Amino acid sequence: MRLILLGPPGAGKGTQAKMLKEKFQIPQISTGDILRAVDEDTELGVEVKKIMAAGQLVPDDMVVDAIKERIRQADCATGFILDGFPRNIAQAEKLSETLIDMSLAIDNVIDLELDPEEVVERLTGRSTCSNCGAMFHQVSRPPKVSGVCDGCESKLAQRSDDNIETIQKRLKVYEESTAPLKEFYKKQGNLITVEAKGSVEEIFSHVCKMIER
Ligand code: AMP
């Protein structure tokens, strides 16, 4: 099963990707996580951090090369979930070329739809476990103990780009560069649209129904 998760920041791509990973036992590949892990003490790390803090996209080559290498690894043999990639048409075209070279195809592109007003509310309230990556929200999914992960009891952290100014920039970049991918994949006939409202479990159940049609 090879899946792509589309949708604006805050639509729940990361959360749904983690649930799909458990259900289908395939890896979640998040370009955001890959970029956040780049060593900040290198020239590249400083540059990446600057771009992310500005809410812009890093150069295509950087993420395309990382994805090309990642999907060739052994754990991707039975499938993978792309979370946050592709982010523009050029990246989608490179992905298509790579998959054709590997004689593979994407099964479903899941577009999680969410209104821009809700994006701001969701992102300003979210926090992530610094150890296991579990996600929480101060209103819709509060941790049992404030600031502490329910699962592994590690500290929760807010992402540095989840501030109102950067969120507005990320939304603009989404509308201009990423939203056109809906039409791109619709034409390929594998786009699934799911309203990203309701509980995490409700959205997941909807996603699964659409995948298993
Ligand atoms: P995310 O964790 O998916 O919200 O991504 C956080 C940030 O990482 C984005 O705002 C971009 O700066 C960068 N990023 C993640 N994925 C990509 C991508 N496919 N292409 C370019 N930049 C990306």
Image: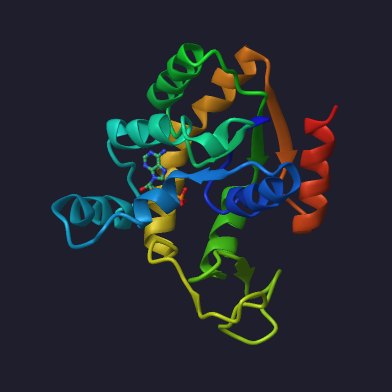
User: Where is residue 187 shown, x and y percent of the image?
Assistant: 61, 13
The relative height of residue 201 versus residue 182 in the rendered view (above or below) is below
23 relative to 71 in the view: left or right = right
Q: Residue at x 58, y 64 (%)?
A: 121
User: Where is residue 66 shown, x and y percent of the image?
Assistant: 36, 37
The picture quadrant where one finds residue 139 is bottom right
- In the picture, the quarter occupied by the N terminus is top right
114 relative to 71 in the view: left or right = right
Q: Residue at x 19, y 49 (%)?
A: 44
User: Where is residue 199 shown, x and y percent of the image?
Assistant: 78, 59
Q: Is residue 23 visible?
A: yes
**Residue ranking furthest to the front:** 74
- In the picture, the quarter occupied by the C terminus is top right
187 relative to 91 in the view: left or right = right
Q: Is residue 5 visible?
A: no
The relative height of residue 82 versus residue 138 in the rendered view (above or below) is above
The relative height of residue 74 versus residue 32 in the rendered view (above or below) is above
Total residue callouts: 0
Q: Residue at x 52, y 26 (%)?
A: 181
Here the colouring is rainbow
The relative height of residue 134 versus residue 149 in the rendered view (above or below) is above
Q: Residue at x 68, y 20 (%)?
A: 190
**Residue ranking furthest to the left:** 43
98 relative to 11 in the view: left or right = left
User: Where is residue 16 shown, x and y percent of the image?
Assistant: 67, 49
Q: Nearer the viewer, residue 43 or 152?
A: 152
The picture quadrant where one finds residue 182 is top right
**Residue ranking furthest to the bottom:** 145
